[in-house]
Amino acid sequence: MFILSRSEVLEANMIREVTRKDIPNCVELIRDSFMTVADEYGFTAENEPRFTAFAISEDRLYWHMEKEHRPMFVAEEEPAF
């Protein structure tokens, strides 16, 4: 779910598995993070609908978690969710 440098992982106080209740916050975080790239390159939902900022949804992450059993983790300095 998140790509961290080795130093970021070591500095994080807590790495934990994402739970079902975290998914809405994860979607918001992913959208916000990828939106900076979309803004920089002029991507919109109309011209790049499959770009992560526009394609991510709660349903999609629930599918990855529950049907594909993808491991999802979050690194937190303080509990974010």
Image (tube, grey):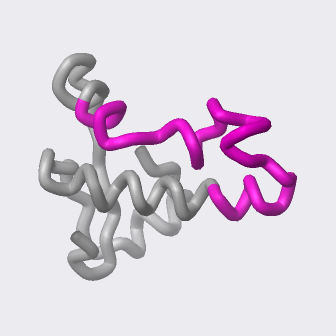
Residue sticking out furthest to the bottom: 78
Taking the spot 44% from the left edge, 62% from the top edge, the residue there is 29
Was residue 43 drawn as part of the magenta stretch in this picture?
yes
| Above/below status of 18 relative to 68 | below
Give whichever of 27, 6 is nearer the camera: 27
Image quadrant where one finds the C terminus: bottom left
Please give the range of residues in magenta: 35-62
| Image coords of residue 27 (percent x, y) | 38, 52
Residue sticking out furthest to the top: 68
Task: Answer left or right for 66 relative to 7.
Answer: left
Q: How many marks?
A: 0
| Above/below status of 13 relative to 39 | below
**Which quadrant would residue 65 be assigned to in this image?**
top left
| Above/below status of 66 relative to 5 | above
Taking the spot 27% from the left edge, 26% from the top edge, the residue there is 63
| Image coords of residue 41 (percent x, y) | 86, 53
Was residue 78 drawn as part of the magenta stretch in this picture?
no
Residue sticking out furthest to the right: 41
| Image coords of residue 18 (percent x, y) | 21, 50
Task: Answer left or right for 60 relative to 36.
Answer: left
Task: Answer left or right for 69 relative to 1.
Answer: left
Task: Answer left or right for 46 relative to 18.
Answer: right
Give whichever of 56, 75 is nearer the camera: 56
| Image coords of residue 68 (percent x, y) | 26, 18
Residue sticking out furthest to the front: 46
Image quadrant where one finds the N terminus: top left
Taking the spot 30% from the left edge, 61% from the top edge, the residue there is 25
